[in-house]
Image (spheres, rainbow, N blue to C red):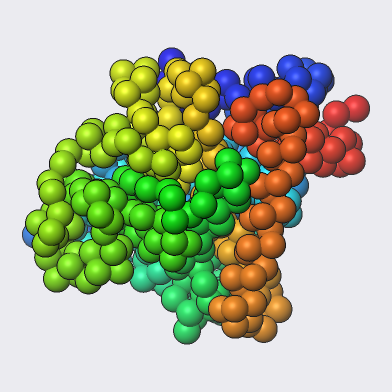
Amino acid sequence: MNLFEMAKIPLNRAQELLGVSDIAASYLQQPERVLEVSIPVLMESGKVQLFRGYRSQHCTALGPAKGGIRFHPSVTVDEVKTLSFWMTFKCAVMDLPLGGGKGGVTCDPTQLTNKELERLARGYIAKIAPIIGEDRDIPAPDVNTNPKIMGWMMDEYSKWNGFLCPGVLTGKPKTIGGSAGRGSATGRGVSFTVREALKKMNIKPADATVAVQGFGNVGSFSAKLIHDLGCRVVALSDVNGAIYNSQGLNPYDVEKFVKENKTLVGYPGSQPISNAELLELPVTVLVPAALEMQITAENADRVKARLIAEGANGPLSADADNILDAKGVMVIPDILANAGGVTVSYFEWVQNRYRYYWGEKEVNSKLEEKMVAAFNEIFDLAQKYHCTLRVAAYICALERLVMGMELRGWLS
Ligand code: GLU
């Protein structure tokens, strides 16, 4: 089964539970539009190299498409379609007036110089410019893209228009229209959902141990902010390996070490373990914040965490979901757990349109209010329908999407 088909399993379950009409269901089975582009880049060698890029707009029933751009060697059209599908439901879960989109370029950014990366970023945005815009589709960062790249992309799009267009992209540097609090937003959202879930489980943060897989934007902020809740972070990892200390690691200190050493492996006082071992540690909370399909039928049975918060998109396979549910593990699904990023992206887009900017305190408290409301709504739906939090999140999103379609006259 490919990734996109697997991603639809909880949606299909939610459709059955809600009794959604076939026509409403069929709008969500495929993206509305998928664009594939070739991007020529002049390399430092003097030769031109051709890269392949994609942009998928999954559903715009509730608003313009919204979602990040990924630069990674494993990017495929199937992956981008799936990621755009998840964005539709993520935005609907958070009650944002936005639809689902996602983009990607198949490339290995670690092999590109800064100039090559800039040419690729500008080339990609020029190729997808006809289908994006602040009322059409608003990209943002994702794996291996960051505010610097968003700045180049926004500039390239603005050149097309002849004036500065901050609202075409979110996750920009603050000086050119980025929002306060966007950098930490996804990890902050993860920490709010972990805090709320621990409350429901009657576990005090001080009694909870935590392992975080991945130390990029999502993993590092999740680790720091979960540490700030008072939990003991005992394991962390990056692409090079994982580190463990049963007494606890200070993620702020680990971050300083990573700045100097480019990896967390070798952090003083920690024991090196493998990424696979990290996923199977006897911890209270596990936060997979790297890539898709990390916990599958192969290793799910060995996972010992009581709570999993999906910092990444799609880190659990459908089989893993069933196995963990049978074991009584609470899973906060990606479309809720990591929705803090797109929520503050929405705030950024609103501020860009207003040309009026909020302080970080205001952004963080608006984010907290939305995350806590969404968590509780989904928790209550899971009780009502006797289903997992993932299926409940799809039910919550689906109700809004079908209502939007109905009111726009798409269904009759
Ligand atoms: N790439 C992030 C996600 O998967 C953020 C998307 C956005 O801010 O639009 O949710």
Quadrant of the image occupied by residue 19: top right
Horizontal side of 385 relative to 108 (left or right) equals right
Horizontal side of 94 relative to 55 (left or right) equals right
Q: Is residue 300 visible?
A: yes
Q: Position of residue 134 (x, y in %)?
A: 63, 63
- Closer to the camera, 154 or 264? 264
Q: Residue at x 53, y 46 (%)?
A: 203
Q: Residue at x 63, y 63 (%)?
A: 368
- Closer to the camera, 307 or 16? 307
Residue 206 vertical placement versus 176 (above, below): above
Q: Is residue 217 visible?
A: no
State which quarter of the image contains the N terminus. Answer: top left
State which quarter of the image contains the C terminus. Answer: top right
Q: Residue at x 58, y 41 (%)?
A: 201
- Number of labels in the image equals 0
Q: Position of residue 10 (x, y in %)?
A: 60, 24
- Closer to the camera, 86 or 405? 86
Q: Position of residue 38 (x, y in %)?
A: 35, 45
Residue 295 vertical placement versus 245 (above, below): above
Residue 205 vertical placement versus 386 (above, below): below
- Closer to the camera, 321 or 30? 321
Residue 305 vertical placement versus 366 (above, below): above
Q: Residue at x 64, y 40 (%)?
A: 89
Q: Position of residue 37 (x, y in %)?
A: 41, 44
